[in-house]
Amino acid sequence: MMPRRIRGPLVLTLALMALFVVGLVVAGLFVRSIVASSFNNAESVRVARILVAGVVRRQLDEETGIRGYEADRNRILLEPYYEGRAGLPRSRSRLARVLERLRMDDALAVLQDAGRTNRRWLEEVALPLLAPKPGPPSLELRGKTLVDHFRADMASIEMLLARREASSDARAQRAVLLVGFFAFGVAAAVIVAALLFTIQQYRLSMRLEQERGKAEAERRRSAEIRAAYEAEKRIAETLQGAFVQNVLPKPAMLRLGATYLPAADEGKIGGDWYDAFELPGDRVLLAIGDVAGHGIDAAVAMNATRQLVMSCALIDPRPGPVLERVNAELLRNQSPLVTAMAALVHAGTREFDYAVAGHPPAVLWEPGRGARFLEVGSVPLGVLGSAVYRTHRVRSMPGALLVLYTDGAIEHSRDAVAGEELLLAAVESAAQASPANIATAIRSRIFDERKAADDVAILTVRFAERPEGRAAFFERGSQTTVATGTRTGRA
Amino acid sequence: MNESKTIETLRLAGELEISRKREIRDALALSENARAVLLDLSDVTYADSTALTELLRFCAAAQGADMPIAILIEAPQFLRLVQYAGLATAFRIFQDRGDALHYLSECAGT
């Protein structure tokens, strides 16, 4: 769960801390060894001094014994001499070992010298004095000289030991100081480590907080966008629905059919519409159109344009003037661009007039002549104030089929030429099969149950086979003048 | 020579759709000394309603400013769309570049 770019610094901190701990342990061992060696040293020096004192005492015993005997010639007085002579070598060798351990070569040399002096004293002074015949009186002086030399040696060793003791004390002091420093260092290190860790922890939590905040903001934003999109889609669908729910009129001698297929992507539901309403004199006005764009704006503009077409048709139903009036009104209102076709169908004479504004041309199928496209028109509505929309008149024949549609019906493949061929074929087969709703039949032949990428609206008008057959398709419907569209897409 | 300089050529290619709206708008800009414009759409194969609207508004604006305008189109399927949109009735459409330039130089010359 932890973001990767936070893991790096954390690992680094842990590694540093591990290194630190290892350093502390090494330093601790070092300090410990220094302290231990300094205490060992002090102990050895103390032992050496005791041994020096022992050596001096034994030598003194020897001399005392010899002197007593010399004065009194009493053998009992020689007892200390023998004791000292027996103990001295052992004491001396013990001292030598300790001095070796202390690596005091200078003191060892002096001790050897003292040993030699002692031997000379034994050989040159003690042994002659112990002889039955006493030696010359010069021996006494000689003995004193040698003993003094021996004592001077031992004093010199003593001095060296004292000096060593002093230096060893200083080392011990330094070691104690080092222990203090070490303890201080450990404490400082622990504090620094804790501080670093806390800072790291703080930064980590700050960053996690930031990440969480960012993710939250992202989530909220996308939720808002989705909600806005849903709302827009719903509104557009509602507005579009306003047109889809009406019912087609059922005029005499004509049969109307229509279908509206919303875009597969519901967000692209746009401004396609169609209308059909009856006018006096067996006339029906047909209108089909497409407002550029998608969503609410397109749906609103589409409804406004529908109302405009109806109003203008009530003033003058001829398609050209209807489109020109609507064009002027749209330009005034700065509406989005609208493509449209209007047709005025005269049911009795099977004639119809039409005008086109930027809209794909309608298809006319006639028995025996097949399907063909009608004329294209002028620019879409809402672009050019000077645009002129010509009214074309077509005289059709019984059984003819007029098909109006929006561009979704031919531009599904982006190739209008191929789309046209497909549409003509679909109209041809639907016209001959003559199903109940020709518009639905045409649509399903084009799309094969596929979903259309864009909206598709198709409006068809079939002329009666015979002029007198006013009820050829069905009995005359109500006289409602305005009724439009049917929801055939899902019927 | 002077005439050919004042004929400005604006070129668009490929499939024109809503996703390229800004690009189309940027391409449809005239310099100040242009006296006639050739809208070269010879490599355009498709235009959706948004793109057609942009083209239409540009042509209408040029015409409103008394600027001669010729549209060059070669792809038949695109020509069909342009015909549906009624451009052929309001503007001059050519399928040959020479014809278009000839038309424009005559307009600009007079």
Image (tube, rainbow, N blue to C red):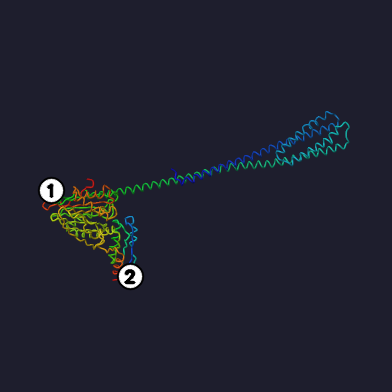
Image side of residue A379 versus residue A178, left or right? left
Q: Which image quarter: residue B84?
A: bottom left
Q: Tell me residue A182's x, y (percent).
A: 59, 42
Crowd tier of the residue under label 1, counting other residues whose Cα lies within 10 Å: few below 14, some 14–19, many 20 or above: few
Q: Tell me residue A429's x, y (percent).
A: 21, 50
In the picture of the structure, the residue carrying the numbered disc 2 is B3
Which chain does the numbered disc 1 sit on?
A
Identify the amino acid type marked 1: Glu
Q: Is residue A66 above or below residue A465?
A: above
Of residue A15 and residue A75, the one placed in the foreground of this image is A15
Could you tell me which secondary element the residue under label 2 belongs to?
A: helix
- Is residue A315 visible to the viewer in this orientation of the structure? no
Image side of residue A442 versus residue A136, left or right? left
- Is residue A93 visible to the viewer in this orientation of the structure? yes
Whether callout 2 and callout 1 share a subunit is answered: no
| Residue sitting farthest toward the front | A368
Q: Which image quarter: residue A109?
A: top right
Identify the residue at image location x=12%, y=52%.
A466
CA gap between label 2 and label 1 equals 69 Å
Which quarter of the rendered picture does the C terminus of chain A lie within? top left
In the picture of the structure, the residue carrying the numbered disc 1 is A475
Of residue A311 and residue A346, the one placed in the foreground of this image is A346
Image side of residue A390 versus residue A18, left or right? left
Identify the residue at image location x=82%, y=30%.
A78
